[in-house]
Amino acid sequence: MAKKIQAIRGMNDILPAQSPVWQYLEGTVKETLASYGYDEIRMPIVEQTNLFKRSIGEVTDIVEKEMYTFEDRNGDSLTLRPEGTASCVRACEEHGLLYNQTQRLWYTGPMFRHERPQKGRYRQFYQIGVETFGMATADIDAEVILMTARLWKQLGLTDAVTLQLNTLASNEARANYRDALVEYLGERKDQLDEDSQRRLETNPLRVLDSKDQNTQALLADAPQLHDYLDDESREHFDLLRSILDAAGVQYEINQRLVRGLDYYCKTVFEWVTDKLGSQGTVCAGGRYDGLVEQLGGKSTPAVGFAMGVERLILLLETLELIPEEVLQTIDVYICPVGEGSARSALLLADQLRDEHSWLRIQTHCGGGSFKSQMKKADKSGAQFALLLGEDEVANGTVTVKDLRGEDGQSTMPVAELYDWLAQKTF
């Protein structure tokens, strides 16, 4: 026998039993974003490699280690997108959506990074991202954070996540801080972990994000970024905090929060949870005022975030916050019993859909005994089974069997079925 072909490690199938949960999360997010007036944009999965090298930074872990990059038949270097922000900026600039305009956009889809797969971290993973352009003031920073806070409330996650907040200041102020940090850490380089020693030469701020305990202990006495803030960055951060305070959104100031991508400035934030072990970040973002210009456009202020779909679903499942009705995909299961009933069952199902488009109806197909059909009706999760035998077809009636409650079984004219179903709660 030929060897079975399996999915690539870290790239997972989303099976029918899981799809309703994905649809629930995506639907809730879409409704929340729509309530703030955000428009959807869809970008290609494959982009030119230079897009990510120029935006993310050539010395980041993503570009150095994690991107899926290949040459196409024309010899062009292409990359499966590892994140969505750069693609969104490219699309907006290419189609003239940025200059002298404001945009509030969102997108969803798969991203790709060659990482070691583990629970909550995959090589093909799904993100929902939000990007805003053309607004330089802290009110839009506050809006995107308030929007995520509202989403957590809609999903029942408010008590399970914590907002961590920081400012990376302006480019000039951050450069001054970088010099001070390099001087401090350079004198203690032999005490740093191997990754931090490398980052000290290429991207010193990433040392702040080190998971090594010894490195973190060294950082306790290191210079603090907030001591180097310029007046504009401090005022921007103070306004953001005042809006969040007024809205009752709680947060923690984390001066070591720098984010992993080179393009961030001023506001950065993460929503984290302690319910998923080491995979604690469920949503992260910040301001990236220089990225559009960096990619060849005119200087454009921007702020956005991305959330991991798999991680949010894992959190909802862990905390048992998925509504029961989400998992119920069928309301009514129609069983054609005996010869000549299959056609009538299919026609009845479509007539019910015409009258009640909200009903989720499945008709049994493929034949089988009455007993086997009832087993499938029960397994479907439907609340009611509609039985159509030869007598029912001849008399214009239908037998209704309550599969979940105490209504038992009764027979009624098909004409009465429509009103009867309309009075039921599914």
Image: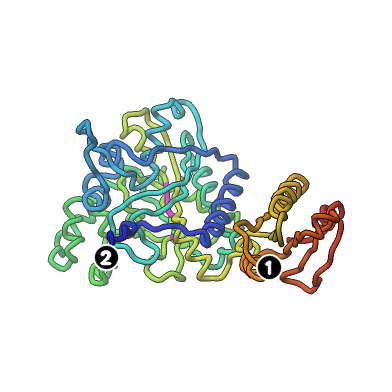
Q: Residues within 10 Å of mark 2 (few under 14, many from 20)?
A: some
Tell me what residue is drawn at x 43 percent, y 39 percent. Answer: 302
Say if residue 245 shows up in the picture. Answer: no
- The reply, left or right, for residue 396 in relation to residue 242 is right
Q: From the top left corner, tell me how far across and down residue 177 is, in percent.
A: 27, 51
Q: Tell me the distance, in whole angstroms, between the alpha carbons under discs 2 and 1.
A: 71 Å
In the image, residue 110 above or below residue 319: above
| Residue range (magenta) | 282-286
Residue that label 1 marks: 370
In the image, residue 185 above or below residue 372: above
Any mark on residue 219, and which? Answer: 2
Quadrant in which the N terminus appears = bottom left
Q: Main secondary structure of the magenta part?
A: strand
- 36 or 380, nearer to the observer: 380
* Quadrant in which residue 77 is drawn: top left
* Quadrant in which residue 405 is drawn: bottom right
- The reply, left or right, for residue 403 in relation to residue 8 is right
Q: Earlier in the sequence, mark 2 or mark 1?
A: 2
Furthest-front residue in view? 339
Say if residue 121 shows up in the picture. Answer: yes
- 425 or 406, nearer to the observer: 406
Q: From the top left corner, tell me how far across and down residue 197 is, in percent.
A: 16, 60
* Quadrant in which residue 222 is drawn: bottom left
Tell me what residue is drawn at x 66 percent, y 56 percent. Answer: 363
Name the kind of residue labelled 2 in the image: Leu
Please, what secondary structure does the residue beneath circle 2 have? helix
Q: From the top left corner, tell me how far across and down residue 107 is, in percent.
A: 48, 43
Name the kind of residue labelled 1 in the image: Phe
Q: From the top left corner, tell me how far across and down residue 110 is, in percent.
A: 40, 49
